[in-house]
Amino acid sequence: MTGSAARHWLIEGRVQGVGFRMWLQGEADAAGIAGWVRNLADGRVEALLGGAPEALDRLEVLARRGPVQARVDQVVAAPWPDPVPAGRFRQVASASAPQRRGAGPPVSGADDT
C-alpha cells in the first residue's frame, strides 16, 4: 500500500460487550482501513490497522469516542513496524495478551463476530 502507515491500538474503558469491535469494523471498512480488532482477556480491545495516515488519524479521533454504548477511557496508539496486509478490516478471536511486534497477524481460522 503506497503512502500507508500501520498502527497498533489498545483501547481501555467499557469497550467489551457494547458492540465496540463491530462498530470499529464498520468505521474502518468505510475508511478503507485494513487490519483486525479483538477483545483481550483483561477487558481491553486491541486493534492493528493499516491505511492512509490521514484515514488512521480520523479513525483514531472517532475511536476515542466509540459507539454510544461504550465508554472509552484511553486509546494507546503506537506506530507498528510491520506492514498490515491489504484487505477488509475484520474481527478475530480474543486473546489473553496483546500482539507482539514482529509476530505477524493473529492465527485464527474464523472471525469471532
Image: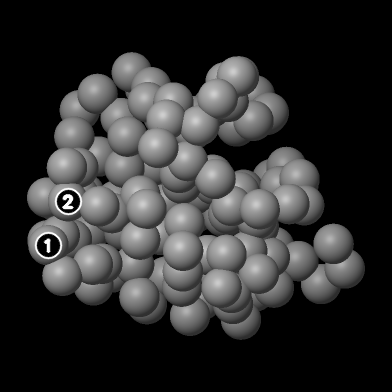
Seen at 55% across and 25% down, the residue is: 110
Q: Under tag 2, what secondary structure?
A: loop
- Residue lying furthest right in this view? 2
List the residue tagged with mark 2: 18
Q: Amino acid at mark 2?
A: Val
Residue 56, compared with residue 84, is above or below; it is below
Coordinates of residue 100 in the picture (x, y in percent): 54, 27
Residue at numbered disc 1:
69
Q: Where does residue 69 sit, x and y in percent of width and height?
A: 12, 62
- Nearer-the-camera pick, 58 or 90: 90
Q: Residue at the spot x=50%, y=32% of the render? A: 111
In terms of image quadrants, where is residue 76?
bottom left
Q: Quarter of the image containing the C terminus?
A: top left
Structure colour scheme: one colour
Sequence-wise, the earlier of marks 2 and 1 is: 2
> Is residue 100 something one can see in this rendering?
yes
Q: Secondary structure at mark 1?
A: loop
Q: Residue 112, image x and y in percent?
A: 42, 30
Taking 98 as reference, is 108 left or right?
right
What mark, if any, has residue 17 been given in the picture? none
Identify which amino acid the numbered label 1 is placed on. Answer: Gln
Query: Tag 1: Cα neighbours inside 10 Å, few (<14), some, or many (≥20)?
Result: few
Q: Residue at x 73, y 52 (%)?
A: 87
87 or 7, nearer to the observer: 87
Residue at 47%, 56% (x, y): give it: 25
Res 77 seen here: no
Locate residue 24 relative to residue 73 in the image: left or right. right
> Relative to 101, is 66 above or below?
below
Q: Are marks 2 and 1 in contact (CB under 8 Å)?
A: yes
